[in-house]
Image (cartoon, rainbow, N blue to C red):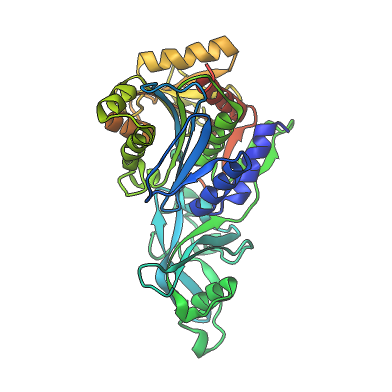
């Protein structure tokens, strides 16, 4: 197995929630002695160091001020997102049907709902506990790390039309089964009791939580020659890992190299820890290096970003749904995503820079465009590119079954994306 696929499989297993993704990123950055910056303190930065800052526990921005940095040097950026479509547990989640103990959930982002049925599911995320001071509650992270939930399908005998397609109701059809109701006392408390036990805390000390339900299956290789990786959360942990590895494998004389992993792309970016925060962080990096605002704005105009998020490979059974001349198959290399609507931020010059790098270093790649009669997704690239007015290329590994509870990719593609990001930070 190649190294980057190994790294990716490790990250998937270490990432049952975006909170855990950030913890894992911090761990890897600490291994190279990166310096953590407090988001609420003054930053004093100097060249030759790697720094990172964690914003609200689901967004992380890390950067290297290269040893030969000179005031006014531009920045190079690789960005990605840390969230994925899933189910989230609502407060007061216990809801009982007969003897069955279920949980009330809401849908985060746009998952393919039916792929969440009949899977072993678990729960992970952030929990807030009472502290001494109401403004300083205790924060902890939890991962049940074993299958505790399942959403059973209806038997075909109870819905003979099932293979014609079924519409699932987000409120009534997606509630996971958590167990059997034990006794009246437990009836309203079974989940809170289980959560408290997991944290070795008193149930009454739990003030709130952001908990994700996740597919507890491990990723695995598949295909006659292990050509594919099948796993949960490939959108967008492929890109998070490529940003991390790309930064850690690279190095250049001048400038600043930045990786940014933002939360909330799947729900439109517009949150305190979403892509809009980037502008402020970039300005603070410049201020921390002693630049004036004018010098900062000049440097931004001499900068370049690749925004990494997954794209669509040609589907083996529905090849007609991709563009008629720009066709990409798994294992053909990462994608440069383009759209004249600028729903992907790439323009011909940004495309040319990425293609130039790929041709120089013999990195396989393809170009992705949607069929002209299909509306594709949008990315954080288009948002950040306009927010910062920065030249940006939208890139990402091709997937099949995007937003399924289990997605599919080619094992060769992860290295191509990583290598391209490495070269952005090296050339
Ligand atoms: Zn994505």
Q: Is residue 82 above or below residue 312?
A: below
Where residue 207 appears, as percent x and y from the top left, is: 41, 73
Judge from the rendering whether residue 50 lies leftward or rightward of residue 167; answer left or right. right
Residue drawn at (54%, 59%), measured in percent from left and top? Answer: 156
Residue drawn at (65%, 50%), measured in percent from left and top? Answer: 218
Q: Is residue 240 above or below residue 40?
A: above
- The image quadrant where one finds ligand 1 is top left
Q: Is residue 317 visible?
A: no
Q: Nearer the viewer, residue 388 or 284?
A: 284
The quadrant of the rendering that contains the N terminus is: top right
Where residue 357 appears, as percent x and y from the top left, is: 51, 14
Q: Nearer the viewer, residue 113 or 197?
A: 197
Given the current orientation, which residue lies at the most extreme bottom position?
184
Judge from the rendering whether residue 398 lies leftward or rightward of residue 293; answer left or right. right
Where residue 219 appears, as percent x and y from the top left, is: 65, 45
Q: Is residue 196 visible?
A: yes
Where residue 375 appears, as percent x and y from the top left, is: 33, 32
Q: Nearer the viewer, residue 159 or 142?
A: 142
Judge from the rendering whether residue 15 lies leftward or rightward of residue 89; answer left or right. right
How many labels were placed on the picture? Answer: 0
């Amino acid at each position: 197995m190649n190294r980057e696929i190994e790294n990716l499989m490790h990250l998937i297993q270490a990432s049952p929630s975006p909170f855990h993704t950030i913890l894992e990123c911090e761990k890897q950055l600490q291994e190279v002695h990166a310096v953590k910056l407090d988001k609420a303190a003054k930053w004093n930065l100097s060249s030759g160091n790697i720094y990172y800052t964690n914003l609200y526990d689901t967004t992380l921005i890390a950067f290297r001020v290269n040893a030969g940095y000179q005031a006014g040097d531009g920045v190079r950026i690789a960005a990605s997102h840390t969230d994925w479509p899933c189910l989230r547990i609502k407060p007061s989640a216990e809801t009982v049907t007969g003897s069955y103990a279920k949980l009330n959930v809401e849908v985060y982002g746009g998952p393919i709902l039916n792929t969440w049925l009949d899977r072993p599911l678990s729960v992970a995320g952030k929990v807030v506990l009472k502290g001494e001071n109401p403004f300083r509650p205790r924060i902890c992270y939890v991962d049940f790390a074993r299958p505790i939930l399942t959403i059973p399908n209806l038997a075909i005998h109870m819905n003979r039309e099932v293979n014609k397609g079924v519409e699932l109701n987000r409120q009534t059809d997606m509630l996971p089964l958590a167990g059997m109701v034990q006794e009246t006392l437990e009836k309203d408390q079974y989940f809170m009791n289980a959560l408290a036990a997991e944290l070795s805390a008193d149930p009454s000390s739990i003030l709130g939580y952001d908990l994700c339900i996740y597919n507890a299956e491990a990723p695995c290789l598949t295909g006659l020659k292990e050509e594919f990786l099948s796993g949960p959360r490939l959108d967008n942990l492929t890109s998070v890992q490529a940003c991390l590895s790309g930064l850690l494998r690279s190095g250049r004389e001048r400038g600043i190299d930045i990786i940014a992993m933002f939360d909330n792309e799947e729900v439109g970016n517009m949150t305190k820890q979403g892509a809009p925060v980037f502008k402020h962080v970039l300005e603070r990096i410049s201020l921390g290096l002693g630049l004036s605002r004018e010098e900062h704005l000049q440097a931004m105009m001499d900068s370049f970003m690749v925004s990494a998020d997954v794209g669509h490979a040609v589907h083996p059974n529905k090849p007609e749904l991709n563009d008629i001349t720009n066709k990409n198959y798994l294992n053909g290399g990462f994608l440069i995503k383009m759209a004249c609507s600028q729903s992907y931020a790439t323009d011909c010059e940004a495309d040319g820079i990425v293609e130039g790098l790929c041709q120089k270093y013999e990195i396989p790649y393809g170009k992705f465009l949607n069929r002209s009669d299909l509306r594709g997704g949008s990315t954080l690239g288009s948002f950040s590119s306009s927010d910062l007015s920065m030249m940006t290329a939208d890139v990402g590994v091709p997937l099949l079954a995007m937003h399924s509870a289990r997605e599919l990719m080619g094992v060769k593609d992860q290295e191509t994306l990583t290598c391209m990001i490495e070269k952005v930070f090296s050339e």
